[in-house]
Amino acid sequence: MTRHTVLRADLKERHVNMMAFSACIGFGLFLQSGKVIYIAGPGLAIIAFVLAASVMWSVIACIGEMTALFPVQGPLFEFPGRFIDEAVGYATGWISWFAWTVIIAAEVLAVAQLWKFRFDEQYLKDVGYPDKELGWSTEGYSPAVWVFIFLILIGCINLLPVRQYGQLEYIFGVIKIFFISGLIVFNVILSAIQKVPHGNHFWTWNRPYGFSSESLVVHPSHDANPGVVLRGEQGQFLALWTGIAAGLFSFVGFETIAITAAENKDLEKHETIKLATKKLTLRITILYVLCTFAGGLNVPYNDPNLVNIQINSVRAGQNSVYVLAAVRNHLRVWPSIFNGFFIFSATTSGINALYNSSRLLHALASIPEAWPLFAQNWRRRLERTTSRGVPLGTVTVSWCFGLVAFLAVKPFPAIVLGRITNNAVVSELISYAAICLSYIQFYHRIKAAAEDHTLENRSAYNRDDKQYPYRTHGQLFRAYYGLLFCILLILFNNWRAFIHPFSTPDFIASYIGIVAFFALIAAYHIRSDGWNPFKWRRHASMQIFRPPPKVVVPGRRRGHLEFPNPKAPIWDEENFKSLVQFVWGWLK
């Protein structure tokens, strides 16, 4: 019987685009944006999302360029292992895989929370809502019911052949784009009709509110004594920093573009990595910023339901700034529609999280050195795929970690969910920092190769060559920027845990990933170099010949507008055709 171990390259560019987009749009945008507005204020929240997007912009270009030149399986750990140290690469692979399994549980936990959709009657009375009650009759059901149902759904979809899976993800992504665009228009219209009662379209930005929040409550609650409150420039800076850390979870998922490299079709012809990377950066940044801006126009940052979104918790749809905008404007039906879509969005992101974790584990399974000796039999089993290229073993193992979502039955699932997401973000930030550092090494290595006259194909490593698959301006600076920003976020992502009252669970959730990362590095060095740390050596091959570097097919580059007849007007048949192809290439 044939033993299958290879994934099938059946994904097209449009599949990769929407898989990465869908991974980024889970419950983060819809529930976290309100949290960031509460923490920092409407204006400062936009700045927080822009800075968080700049980290994504830097990291995604690093991994995108390396993967476009070398489309290897498991690029998230292959490149750190190749250009930094093998132990760093393996440790990055394991914490990235674990982070994605945690995200599966987080998305399913969020789904269970979203079914508890019920507004407080006093809040509805205070904002003048026309109905006495607003909510679903499902809040009485056990969260375990929803966890079970949606885990089964997520698992079944990931058993599909990757081509059919990609088609589904494309449909999910298109639905999300249209919904988010509609949500922006919806909130702009609400802002336009609010001028009469409030006197100004930017009433949430003016006194008694403002561009930024007046103070930062370190441990928010509804007690009479709020505890430690920071004001002035110190409070605003820490509010901005906290907003960046809180909002960054919304951007996790962009590395899906690189994870799909082994299943991408015709990389050289279609320049999938380059276009998908640029499209995702533009779409995510623009939509997140506009959504946060539009939502902040209709709900003041001190709304009681935003205060309920504590910094280390993620709650239900009644805490979403977009649902609150509809409720405060006395609209029926829309709050329930929004909450229903949030459930759909979190579910599809959970589906994508299982895909990412299963592919990362399959890539790790192909490397014997990444596993301890006693686990080699398990590794060989996980390496197998079905005849349709589905890594059934790694899908199953990763799915099992989603059972953590049954923590939804705990007394405080919102806080549990907040800690889970915080842990996942820190693990991903460690991975991003390793990617940026590996790119710095990669950059200098290929630069030396491009100048080496003894190499026959040295032009393949020349970033200024027209056939180089993906190059961005100032990328070396962006790599240093991303590395520094990620390190600072890793170290100070939850500075509030150190302020009285000290929270041991929050501290562990925020920093256990750092300990695990260095423990894994130490374990690999002990196995290869012995117990004496002074004798540990750096194992980095720095090789750039396997696989051979990819170059694009000669001719017109995709994503660039070039008119066949430069001297002819734009409505010339050939020129107009090129314009239509250019626009469609960026839209699809």
Image (cartoon, helix red, strand yellow):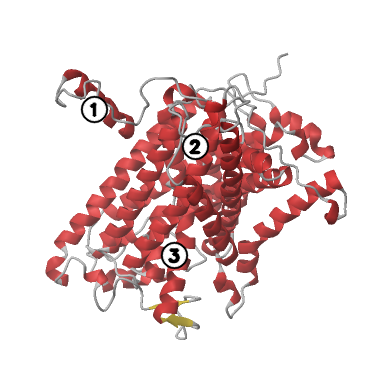
Q: Amino acid at mark 2?
A: Ile
The N terminus, quarter of image: top right
Using the image, determine if residue 238 lies above or below residue 34. Answer: below
Identify the residue position indicated by label 3 in the image.
Answer: 243
Mark nearer the viewer, 1 or 3: 1
Using the image, determine if residue 333 lies above or below residue 327. Answer: above
Identify the residue position indicated by label 2 in the image.
Answer: 257
Pick the residue in front: 565 or 331: 565
Q: N-terminal of the two: label 2 or label 1? A: 2
Residue 484 visible in the displayed image: yes
Q: Position of residue 196 (x, y in %)?
A: 11, 68
- Does residue 208 appear left or right of residue 514 in this picture? left
Callout 3: SS: helix
Residue in the picture at 51% in, 62% down: 414
Q: For the view shown, which residue lies furthest in the left direction?
A: 196
Mark nearer the viewer, 2 or 1: 1
Residue in the picture at 21% in, 56% down: 188
- Does residue 161 appear left or right of residue 137 in this picture? right
Tell me how far mark 1 sits from mark 3, CA to CA.
40 Å
- Does residue 252 appear left or right of residue 300 in this picture? right
Q: Amino acid at mark 1?
A: Leu
Identify the residue position indicated by label 1 in the image.
Answer: 579
The C terminus, quarter of image: top left
